Amino acid sequence: MHKAGFGQVGAIVGPVIALGLLLNAGAGAAPSTTFAVNGRSIFQSGKDLSGVQIVARKPPLFRSCAGCHRSNGSGGVHLPGGAVSADLRHAALVKKQKRPYTMALIERAISTGIDNEGKPLDPVMPRWRLSRSDLHAVAYYVYRELK
């Protein structure tokens, strides 16, 4: 079976970018709250807080991350071609890796389809086209909020 989503191993890069983004994210609500809520919205519904639908380079099987990876990020969904969606919860991405995923590696996987070993993900994984802030928000949600 092929893994769809994120691969097995990754390089370690500090999450300093996430801290800077949290301090500079949206006005109104506390920055970290707005940032996390936008990431959750993108992951669960495929739409950012403005209601804009995310798109991929090729039409995806589902319009949101949760469509393949489940609302709790546990994955395990059997997809065309024998692929199985990856578990995106923190333990699977960070604690169970020889070289854990980081925010930067999650962003790379989401946008380019390259895993934490530098290998291409299964083609069933969409190569999402997101604004920089939306990409950071959904990566933050996956990295910090999925338990």
Image (tube, rainbow, N blue to C red):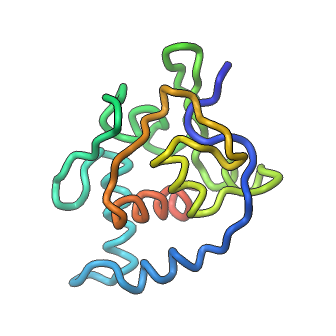
In the image, farthest residue toward the top: 81
134 on left or right of 12: left
Give percent across and percent down for residue 13. Answer: 68, 69
141 on left or right of 43: right
Looking at the image, which is closer to me, 107 or 74? 107
Q: Is residue 114 above or below residue 52?
A: above
| Quadrant into which the N terminus falls | top right
Query: Which quarter of the picture shows residue 120?
Result: top right
Give percent across and percent down for residue 117. Answer: 72, 46
| Quadrant into which the C terminus falls | bottom right
Q: Is residue 56 above or below residue 132?
A: above
Give percent across and percent down for residue 25. Answer: 33, 79
Q: Residue at x 78, y 56 (%)?
A: 99
In the image, farthest residue toward the right: 98
Looking at the image, which is closer to me, 131 or 86? 131
Q: Residue at x 59, y 50 (%)?
A: 89
Query: Which quarter of the picture shows residue 68?
Result: top left
Q: Is residue 88 above or below residue 144?
A: above
Query: Which quarter of the picture shows residue 12?
Result: bottom right
Q: Residue at x 60, y 40 (%)?
A: 87
Q: Is residue 61 above or below residue 67?
A: above
